[in-house]
Image (tube, rainbow, N blue to C red):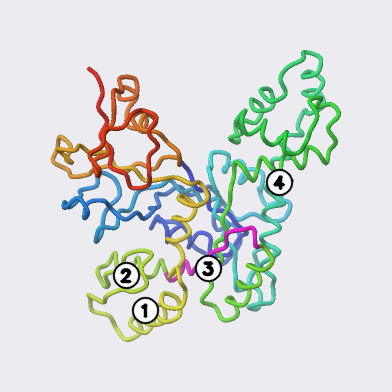
Amino acid sequence: MIIGVVGKANVGKSTFFKALTLADVEIANYPFATIKPNHGIGFVKVKCVDEELGVQCNPREGFCVNHKRFVPVDIIDVAGLVPGAHEGKGMGSQFLNDLNGADALIHVIDCSGSTNEKGEPVNKCSYDPAKDVEFLEEELDFWYFDILKKGWEKFARQIQQEQQDIVKALAKQLSGVGVSEDLCKKIINQLSLSGQPVSWSEKDLFNLASEFRKATKPMIIAANKIDVPGAEDNYKRLRETFPHLTIIPCSAESELALKEAAKHRLIEYISGEKDFKITGDLNEKQKQALEFIKENVLKKFVEGSGVQAIINNVIFGVLEYIAIFPGGINKLEDQYGNVLPDCFLIPKNSTALDFAYKIHSDLGDKFIRAIDVKTKMTVGKEHLLKHRDVIEIISGK
């Protein structure tokens, strides 16, 4: 699974990425500080099952703090986009293509309205951030439209002449952006398109591209710089203007400051929490900065700094994944003595057999049964798993 961080230049996108991953990236107050995509590991937060099982876990990947399990997720940060990116402006085509493998997107916007459409600094609240929401959706739709339209006439004639199945042919053509046959069939029916693609209009193609984009690149809006005066009012207007979108206020700069302070053992802070504890020697300026974050960000907004809430919402809300822990009913340790070492993120409605294959193909091929460790109930391969289940897979030799 890959989550893409996207947005206009100079909105705090790289700061957001670093706040998620603590990766060493360039953060600068000018467009195109990021040219090549940055890759890093972010962490989705799950209430660990160790406490209710009476043990202390030892994660093989990620970490666990106060029974809060942080599970790794791949994050990619592409360069800032500009209007006309799908036409190649600002190297936009290259940046859009970097997102091919992304399963979902986080669109970072400057909620304070202090960055114009070109990514240039302007007076606070002088630019309407709603324009950025519209601009990016339009760019992504045109990107998909350009992919779909390329060679369309020849493709459509061939489909008709050879009497090919349009669903299979179109899904194959768009497999690179994650379009499956099931999705293709669903959207063609949804738009009431005929089985003769030669008759589809340019408007039909654009609507088809837009629906494919929404399904394969679902997006959440990170309303960044929420701590800037005036940003909160902009956020409220965004919620009213786009009631169908998930928009979460955040202060990436605040989250990054807290994580850096925790990294240097100056404070104890768990990402997503609404408070922290000072544990190191701070000068007066540092104390004042942290106090400002506590009063104006953490305590003020339901989601604290918002950064952790956003990645959690993408994984568990937008993509509808669940977290499953492998473990044995009589033994929760691996061969090295690590307790509950793994936590897997898998799609909602996954079965015990799906989970077996997720762990290892041999477990799936030789699956006999599974055991729900919490209830000690034996379940079959079609058993639907729930978020935070602990499952033991029993397989043959």
On the image, numbered disc 4 is attached to which residue? 141
User: Which of disc 3 and disc 4 is earlier in sequence?
Assistant: 4
**Do labels 4 and 3 touch, CB within 8 Å?**
no
Task: State the CA–CA distance, disc 2 to disc 4.
Answer: 40 Å
**Do labels 1 and 2 touch, CB within 8 Å?**
yes
Near-viewer residue (227 or 303):
303
On the image, numbered disc 2 is attached to which residue? 261
Task: State the CA–CA distance, disc 4 to disc 3.
Answer: 25 Å
Q: Secondary structure at mark 4?
A: helix
**Do labels 2 and 4 touch, CB within 8 Å?**
no
145 sits to left or right of 346? right
User: Which of disc 1 and disc 4 is earlier in sequence?
Assistant: 4
Closer to viewer: mark 2 or mark 4: 4
138 sits to left or right of 44? right
Q: Secondary structure at mark 3?
A: strand
On the image, numbered disc 3 is attached to which residue? 249
Q: What amino acid is at disc 2? A: Ala
Q: Residues within 10 Å of mark 3 (few under 14, many from 20)?
A: many
**Do labels 4 and 1 touch, CB within 8 Å?**
no
Write down the region rendered in magenta.
243-254
Q: Residue at x 61, y 60 (%)?
A: 9
- Residue 158 in the image, given as x and y percentages of width and height: 78, 18
Q: What amino acid is at disc 1? A: Leu
On the image, numbered disc 1 is attached to which residue? 290
Q: What amino acid is at disc 3? A: Pro
Residue 212, compared with residue 174, is above or below; it is below
Closer to viewer: mark 3 or mark 1: 3
Q: Quadrant of residue 380?
A: top left
